[in-house]
Amino acid sequence: MSRLLITGASLQGERTADVLVVDGTIAEIGAGLDASGAEVVDADGLVALPGLVDLHTHLREPGREDAETVLSGSRAAAVGGYTAVLAMANTNPVTDTAEAAERVWSLGQAAGVVDVHPVGSVTKGLAGEELSEIGLMARSKARVRVFSDDGRCVGNARVMRRALEYVKAFGGVISQHSQDTDLAGSTSCCHEGELSGRLGLPGWPGVAEDVIVARDVMLARHTGSRVHVAHVSTAGSVEVVRWAKSQGIAVTAEVTPHHLLLTTDLLAGYDPTFKVNPPLRPAEDVEALRGALADGTIDAVATDHAPHARHDKEHAFVDAAFGMLGLETAVQVVAQVMVESGLMGWADVARVMSTTPAAIAGLDGQGQGLVVGAPANLTLVDPSADVTVDRADSVSLSRNNPYHGRTFGAAVRATFLRGRATVLDGKLV
Amino acid sequence: MRKHLLSVADLSLDDVETLFATAAEMHDVQHREVKKLPALRGRTVINLFFEDSTRTRSSFEIAGKWLSADTINITGKGSSTSKGESLRDTVLTICAMGVDALVMRHSASGAALQVSQWVDAAVINAGDGTHEHPSQALLDAYTLTRFFDARRLGPLEGKHVVIVGDLTHSRVFRSNVGLLTMLGARVTVVAPPTLMPSGVGAWSASAGFATSYDLDEVLPTADAVMMLRVQKERMSGGFFPTGREYTVGYGLTRDRLSLLRDDVPILHPGPMNRGLEIAADAADAATSVVLDQVSSGVAVRMSILYHLLAGEGSEK
Amino acid sequence: MVPDGAEQQPDQPVPPSEERPGRVVFDADEIARALTRIGHEILERNRGAHDLVLLGVPSRGVPLAQRIADRIASVEGVEVPVGSLDVTFYRDDLRKHPARGPQHTDIPPGGIDGKTVVLVDDVLYSGRTVRSALDAMNDLGRPDVVRLAVLVDRGHRELPIRADHVGKNLPSARSERVMVRLAETDGFEEVRIAEGTSRVGTAGDAGEGGTQA
């Protein structure tokens, strides 16, 4: 029988207590618990959160193991306080079969650092035409529940409708990368506005996202199915989601840490580190996203962790790969823009980074909160740290870290997956 | 003067005056029997063109040769970029040969700026995507200055320069609007709404230029008119319905010539689409300075190469 | 535009002589007499004013050339063509300084082919300016004869070059600087010698052609 006692933690920032973990399950929560026979972790001054769940991670394996692997990405997740991640389907080969899904799932099991749940693609090869083997992926060992062509939008309304209908059979959800490719094509890489005009960069107008979100919520209403809006980036999308929720439509939405903090003006130096899809938006959009996360219109924070080999970013801006790292810094960013600003408390952070994403993804053993009987997935965060991000310190295989040189006031000190420490003192175990 | 010439924003007013004064001397060299100066002897200038351009490349090539630099052309179509090599690897490889300056043309905005952060050589932006083309703006302003001087029309400062055409996709427009406003000219840019850059309202307000959809309204007060090339493929992109309709709305037609005073120079960076954005009567008008732009281009580029490469601190 | 700012100088107030460093070695009258003598020597050497062209090296060689031409005109009644020959692009020390803009080169309409060209400069020192001038001339034509006239020869040659006509031989140390000031460029006339090597790019702390060449 293994016993772990976490002492003096501030549970979701609300009350201070000890947490006793026995055999991977939270056995007791209270003051002055008996430490005998237990490994003791002093969490004085730290905030305990349920293990974080990321709805949106790119692990690059199979296909681009030079940028990230399931193992390296799992480690990055653990360092960021995560105990579960959903691995996007745009690998090579694409996760569009049961076999492909099981392979990712097995790699995650073998790594054993966080729970890795593959996301299945909506369409074969992400081509947007024929449905992938959605049902077989759902029935596989991987028990896939989230489907997404992320990186590409399911542009065809008929295909999107069928996918929404089809996943109703097993409670699945379609996570949509909302980008009308007629309005924002493959070269579009800068928020369309004054800056894109000045820089001469192909514009990615916010409306290209808004119109797809609008269409998809109507399809969700029509089909009675669930749609999830990946990486919401515009005030317009927020308005649509808010309206849809008011109508009782089954829509959920996620926002990335980078869209909560970084703004489009960072592109002025043409540094491809800041090239991401959807693009960084102006401050007005960022404000709207923060407000929507605080008021519940946006349900979850998801990283869209997108590692890239250095040489894939060392191209001219329009030719460089889209995406930025996010797993290791997500809590820090959310703490700064949402908690330190007073928009949210730590309990809200637990909701948007653990409980709700786990519910959206239909994960059993995750996001159950800090309650007796729940699996002991826990994260300890130092809310009064002073950390300057150095991209060289990352455990990811990639270095496309947009926060390099920024200072944050929070840091993950420890992560526990079913009672086993994966990170202690901020370092991988 | 800074080490690189990436954007007209890299230049101070003094820099521009210096470049123009030297260009005037270079202009004289152009008309000598021996068109050669030893100032850049032993210097190596690579014209690295990832995108086709006959006139800019040959202009820089002649400029380099007349200054005695060793000038080598590398064109991108056969370069490694098309084989998937990163831009950084491509330019580092070229610079490892021992290069003093890279004159660079690339289809991507910002490419010259990025490259300048990777290499030791001086980088001269010869056009980056739809962003900037600073040597073109310098030669345009230099051409205008000489035109006004020769006719005793006073300085460029205070003159009303009208730029017409596909502004969205034009690096010539972006460099010109920056340089001309810096030199004190009053600039009005004219295009159909679909060819106006996004966010031009806020940009023009802060940068101090005017915008218009109505060419006929603007031309009578013009002191100079710059017509930009309109690429025919923009029609398929839905930016305007037909060439005919574009010409009627925004071409410098024979009828529109009559709206101009007879001392208003007509500029075009070339290559011209005669009959589309500029009528033959305008292209060949007595006030057309299209060929002066080309010859000034060599003088201005000699001046740029000289000032970036001749002095101390420009050693590799 | 004009790197050493010489042509702007007449607009600036002229400092009183006692506030200027060093000592005067040549005053306005002596300069005038020297130029007159040089004019005569040129005529004598050339056996008249035929085929003569005077090319001044900017900045101060140009007014000196014009003055010599004026003297020849008053003696011979012939207008000798005067021009300017900038040597900036031909200097061998270009890379030792920030790039400087050139000054004007102006070859008289008759050109220099087959002519007797007299190069005129204010100070002859290392000889490098003269070498640059010879190279520059090479790209502009082929004179029959080239001669050199200078107001001051201060010695310390680094190249096998000597002047044909010298206003004054001025023994100097390398640690000293020789400053020629002319009405046209500076608003007053004198040649002065002072301690301290010239600063590059400062007005005519001569050297040759405005720099310590």
Image (cartoon, helix red, strand yellow):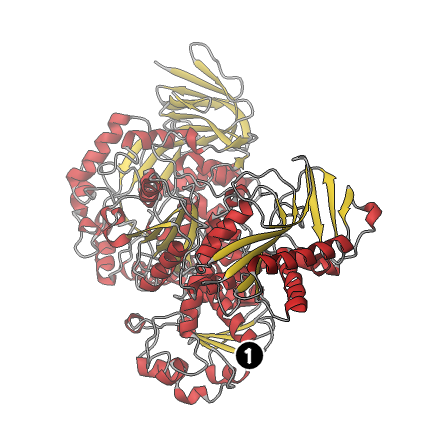
Task: Give the residue at x 47% y 85%.
Answer: B216
Q: Return the x and y of residue A401 as percentages of the image width and height.
A: 42, 38
In terms of depth relative to the viewer, which is nearer, B31 or A171? B31
Q: In which quarter of the image is the C terminus of chain C?
A: top right
Q: Give the residue at the far top of this rendering.
A: A37
Give the letter of the chain under mark 1: B
Q: Return the x and y of residue A216 as percentages of the image width and height.
A: 32, 59
In terms of depth relative to the viewer, which is nearer, C50 or C159? C50
How many discs mark residues in the rendered view? 1
Crowding around mark 1 (Cα neighbors within 10 Å: few <14, some 14 to 19, many 20+) is: few
Task: Give the residue at x 48% y 33%.
Answer: A389
- A326 above or below C102? above
Q: Is mark 1 on a helix, strand or loop?
A: loop
In terms of depth relative to the viewer, which is nearer, C43 or A302? C43
Q: Name the residue under label 1.
A: B151
Q: What residue type is labelled 1?
A: Arg
Q: Return the x and y of residue A163 as percentages of the image width and height.
A: 22, 54
Position of residue A402 in the picture relative to residue A287 (left or right): left
Q: Quadrant of the N terminus of chain C?
A: bottom right
